[in-house]
Amino acid sequence: MIMNEIEKKVRDLISRTTGLPQDVPGDANLYLDLGVASVHALQILADLESEFDVSIPDEEFVEASSVAQLVALMQKLTDVPAREPSNV
């Protein structure tokens, strides 16, 4: 299994917060399949925002219920295109 840096960080944060192994299936539902408690979900949210220096909209975090979905969300939120130089 090849992981990129974002996936490694997401898996590490989830593992540290919940005690789950880092190699849980990416498509497993964190809450229904893996039993992650809501208090842990809030900590994961705070840790992701801090680690990636982003603000995660609540509705997007709630919809991202698996490791794979959280990785995709972090990739989307951190994919900031290079700005064109201004002529000001």
Image: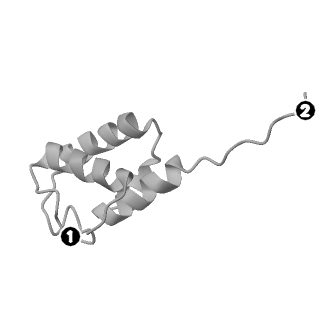
Check the picture and name the quadrant holding the C terminus. Answer: top right
Q: Residue at x 31, y 61 (%)?
A: 3
Q: CB of mark 2 within 8 Å of CB of mark 1?
A: no
Q: Residue at x 11, y 57 (%)?
A: 21
Q: Indicate the position of residue 2 as horizontal and vertical percent values.
A: 30, 66
Q: Residue at x 19, y 45 (%)?
A: 40
Rounded to the nearest angstrom, the CA distance separating label 2 from label 1 is 49 Å
Which residue in the rendered view is the most extreme toward the front? Answer: 2
Looking at the rendered structure, the kind of residue marked 2 is Asn
Looking at the rendered structure, the kind of residue marked 1 is Pro
| Nearer to the camera, 61 or 84 | 84
The correct choice, above or below, for 71 with respect to 57 in the image is below
Which of label 2 and label 1 is nearer to you? 2
Q: Seen in the image, is 64 located left or right of residue 13?
A: right
The correct choice, above or below, for 16 with respect to 7 in the image is above
Q: Seen in the image, is 76 located left or right of residue 62?
A: right
| Nearer to the camera, 43 or 88 | 88
- Mark 2 vs 1, N-terminal side: 1
Image quadrant where residue 50 sits: top left
Which residue in the rendered view is the most extreme toward the top? Answer: 88
Q: Indicate the position of residue 41 as horizontal and vertical percent values.
A: 24, 48
Disc number placed over residue 87 in the picture, else none: 2
Q: Secondary structure at mark 2?
A: loop
Question: Mark 2 Cα within 10 Å, few/some/many (few <14, many 20+)?
Answer: few
| Nearer to the camera, 41 or 11 | 11
Q: Indicate the position of residue 47 as horizontal and vertical percent values.
A: 30, 38
Q: Residue at x 85, y 34 (%)?
A: 86
Q: Which residue is mark 1?
A: 25
Q: Secondary structure at mark 1?
A: loop
